């Protein structure tokens, strides 16, 4: 088998898949190789996320997130329409349940407008109920652009197109190290050695390790945070029509459980965010020595804990206590009952932390000795994946 390619992408999540696809679009005769260590693509963040197409409402104007979310949004919809990927632009409401949240909702609306969103509309409690009859809002914001999508299906469709011709998707193949050999790059893997003039590493929860091994020197560490979901029982699923979000805490925009109708059916509620002792272990008690040593041996983790222990404790309580999880959901839906929710699945966020214990908010791409690395691609990176891929290709040129 020929081991030479025009581009090698490490990681078969949606960012790697979008990068491979975009490269193939730009160079139709190119041979693209994607290396994925699992037996199927999209087994980690991409296949375990909320399935939401974000509109660009939340992100700091001018940030890479804001820029790529809007462009990625439009490209995602076009891709899904052209390639029959299941999606639905159903809109969402963001719900304020207190005067303080109503104030933050105003700020959010301003930010959304600055980011170029149209059609945002404040709703009074009665108008909210016309959209989501079981939700009690002091005020809410209607965001018509938000939707849901099958991200696994989208990743598979991207990969399928990326390897057309002589390309290849190698599953159960872990990239170990990338070397520079003059103008060529050599990628050592668990099932052979591959060569290409360009390598992009989109390794999600493993991104910092791959980057460090390639000489990237930064102060960022990936610290895994598990998000547990509950699901509405089939009998209670009618209580949510589409998507219901709380007003985010400006300090912790990813905290706050939401209700999400899923593309494959059913309604999920969550996720919370708890420190995980394993980067890719989804059980509540999962433990990995090397992952735990990496997180707990990093000063930034302890600084985060010291600054925000109260939040962390609340999230932990919700992880192990159904009544506490229910209470968080009842803030928006007071009539929700214990028997309406059942435990669901879990996802793990690759949360990049800096040495001061600050969450790295924006997307981060860095050049190593031999490869370009996507170091931080948190939400909305699935929505923005095709635009992140544009950014990656611009830096590869
Ligand atoms: C709980 C949760 C909810 C979220 N909700 C949303 C949402 O609703 N909307 C949204 O836009 N975003 C959401 N996100 C964020 C989004 O899912 C991620 O930003 C996105 O999936 C990142 O994609 P990725 O390809 O970078 O990472 P991943 O999907 O994690 O893929 C990385 C891949 O690299 C592989 N890999 C790693 N190391 C190697 C190696 N050495 N060799 C070979 N393969 C390797 C892994 O096996 C994995 O398949 C959510 C995330 C989480 C965790």
Image (cartoon, rainbow, N blue to C red):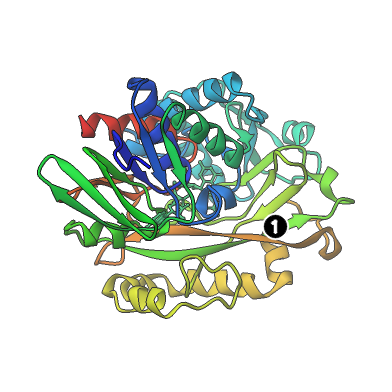
| Residue 220 picture location, percent across and down | 26, 61
Q: Secondary structure at mark 1?
A: helix
Residue highlighted by disc 1? 329
| Residue 162 picture location, percent across and down | 44, 31
Looking at this view, is 207 or 311 the one in front? 207
Outermost residue, front direction? Answer: 1
158 versus 175 height, above or below: above
The residue under the point 30% across, 36% down is 5
The residue under the point 47% across, 24% down is 75
Q: How many numbered badges does the structure rendering display?
A: 1
Crowd around label 1: few <14 · some 14–19 · many ≥20 (10 Å) = many
Does the closest atom of ligand 1 sit within 8 Å of the Cβ of label 1?
A: no
| Residue 286 picture location, percent across and down | 55, 76
Residue 59 visible in the picture: yes
The residue under the point 47% across, 41% down is 14
| Image quadrant in which you'd find residue 206 | bottom left
| Image quadrant in which you'd find residue 200 | top left
Residue 115 visible in the picture: no
| Residue 238 picture location, percent across and down | 84, 43
Looking at this view, is 216 or 99 the one in front? 216
Question: Can you say which quadrant of the picture contains the N terminus?
Answer: top left
The residue under the point 90% across, 51% down is 235
Question: Can you say which quadrant of the picture contains the C terminus?
Answer: top left
Outermost residue, left direction? Answer: 182
Looking at this view, is 197 or 316 the one in front? 197
93 versus 271 height, above or below: above
């Amino acid at each position: 088998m020929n081991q030479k390619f025009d581009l090698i992408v490490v990681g078969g999540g949606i960012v790697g898949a979008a990068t491979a696809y975009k490269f193939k679009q730009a160079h139709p005769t190119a041979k693209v190789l994607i290396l994925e260590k699992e037996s199927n693509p999209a087994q980690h963040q991409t296949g375990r996320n909320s399935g939401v197409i974000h509109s660009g409402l939340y992100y700091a104007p001018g940030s890479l997130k804001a820029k790529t979310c809007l462009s990625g949004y439009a490209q995602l919809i076009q891709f899904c329409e052209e390639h029959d990927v299941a999606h639905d632009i159903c809109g969402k409401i963001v719900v304020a349940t207190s005067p303080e949240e109503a104030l933050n909702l105003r700020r959010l609306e301003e930010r959304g407008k600055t980011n170029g969103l149209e059609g945002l509309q404040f709703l009074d409690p009665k108008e909210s109920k016309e959209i989501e009859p079981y939700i009690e809002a002091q005020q809410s914001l209607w965001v018509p652009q938000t939707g849901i999508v099958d991200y696994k299906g989208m990743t598979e469709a991207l990969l399928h197109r990326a390897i057309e011709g002589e390309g290849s998707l190698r599953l159960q193949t872990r990239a170990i190290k990338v070397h520079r050999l003059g103008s060529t790059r050599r990628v050592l893997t668990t099932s052979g050695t591959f060569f290409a003039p360009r390598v992009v590493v989109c390794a999600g929860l493993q991104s910092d390790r791959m980057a460090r091994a390639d000489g990237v020197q930064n102060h960022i560490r990936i610290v895994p945070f598990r998000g547990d979901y509950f699901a509405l029982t089939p009998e209670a699923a009618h209580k949510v029509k589409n998507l219901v979000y709380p007003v985010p805490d400006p300090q912790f925009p990813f905290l706050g459980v939401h209700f999400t109708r899923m593309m494959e059916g059913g309604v999920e509620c969550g996720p919370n965010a708890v420190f995980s002792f394993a980067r890719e272990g989804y059980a509540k008690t999962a433990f990995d020595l090397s992952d735990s040593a990496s997180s707990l041996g990093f000063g930034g983790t302890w600084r985060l804990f010291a600054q925000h222990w109260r939040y962390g404790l609340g999230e932990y309580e919700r992880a192990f206590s159904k009544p506490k999880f229910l209470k968080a959901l009842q803030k928006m839906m007071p009539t929700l009952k214990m028997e309406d929710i059942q435990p669901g699945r879990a996802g793990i966020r690759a949360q990049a932390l800096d040495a001061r214990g600050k969450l790295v908010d924006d997307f981060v791409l860095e050049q190593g000795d031999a490869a370009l690395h996507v170091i931080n691609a948190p939400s909305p990176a699935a929505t923005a994946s095709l635009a992140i891929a544009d950014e990656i290709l611009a830096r590869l040129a």
